[in-house]
Image: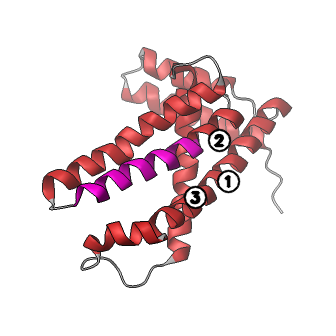
Amino acid sequence: MWNIKPVLIYETFFCTIQMKLENNSGGELDDGSLKVLKFIHTFDPADEKEKKRMAVYFMISIVSGILFAILDGVINANPLAKKYYAIYQPIAKTSLNPVAGLLIDLLFGFIMAGIFVLLYNSLPGETGLVKGVSFAIMVWFFRVVMYVASQWMMFITPVKTLIYTLVAGLGEMLVLGVLYGFTLKPF
């Protein structure tokens, strides 16, 4: 087939990004744009160490996406959840699309792993585990706590349902955060 080298694709991508940033800023790059360019320019797709890091990121993203799907299933389909979530029965779908659900969870896995890698150096803690737990708590706040607060304000939802959602969501985020903390490092 085609004989395109990854380095050539990378160089083309880098030059395109640099031209777009320069055009959008009137020829002068701000600090944020320079940081993006430095990150992109220091990434060498031919470097074996970086290939391994990308392979780990790719594998952990898939694992976390599958884990997301499994945990969502366990959290939402167990007898306790069915009892607490019965309030949503009148508006719940009667059938689910597991393929679409898995694809969405895989996408979430890639996004969450990518955000973790980008924030790694900014997260509190000295070890990957502590950084993973910090990330989990942050994501739990933005993903679960804000959702539960909205449900509490807008709907007549039993407190037990809200507490179950908070606790189950915290557990899910901690599992993913610990996975990321043990396996992912910044590029």
Q: Residue 129: in sight, yes or no?
A: yes
Task: Indicate yes or no whether the magenta region holds residue 171.
Answer: yes
Which residue is label 3 attached to?
106
In the image, what residue type sits under mark 1? Val
> Would you say the magenta stretch is mainly helix, strand or loop?
helix
| Total number of numbered discs in the rendering | 3
Image height of 150 relative to 7, above or below: below
For the record, the magenta segment spans 158-176
Q: Nearer the viewer, residue 41 or 169?
A: 169
| Above or below, comparing residue 43 to residue 84 in the picture | above
Which residue lies at the image location 25% right of the left edge and 77% below the top edge?
A: 91
The residue indicated by pointer 1 is 63
From the top left corner, tell me how far across and down residue 136 is, in percent.
50, 37
**In the rendered view, would you say 152 is above or below 10?**
below
**Disc 3, SS:** helix
Q: Earlier in the sequence, mark 1 or mark 3?
A: 1
Residue 49: x %, y % from top left: 82, 30
Q: Is residue 67 above or below residue 80?
A: above
- Foreground mark, 1 or 3, reads 1
Disc with the residue nearer the chain's start (1 vs 2): 1
Badge 1 element: helix
Q: Quadrant of residue 24?
A: top left
Under circle 2, the secondary element is helix
The residue identified by callout 2 is 179
Sequence order check, earlier mark of 2 and 3: 3
Q: Position of residue 141 (x, y in %)?
A: 36, 39
The C terminus sits in image quarter: top right
Q: CA distance from mark 1 to mark 3?
A: 8 Å
Where residue 184 sits: x, y (%)?
Answer: 68, 35
Q: Quadrant of the N terminus?
A: bottom right
In magenta segment, residue 105 = no
Dot 2 alpha-carbon crowd within 10 angstroms: few under 14, some 14 to 19, many 20 or more: many
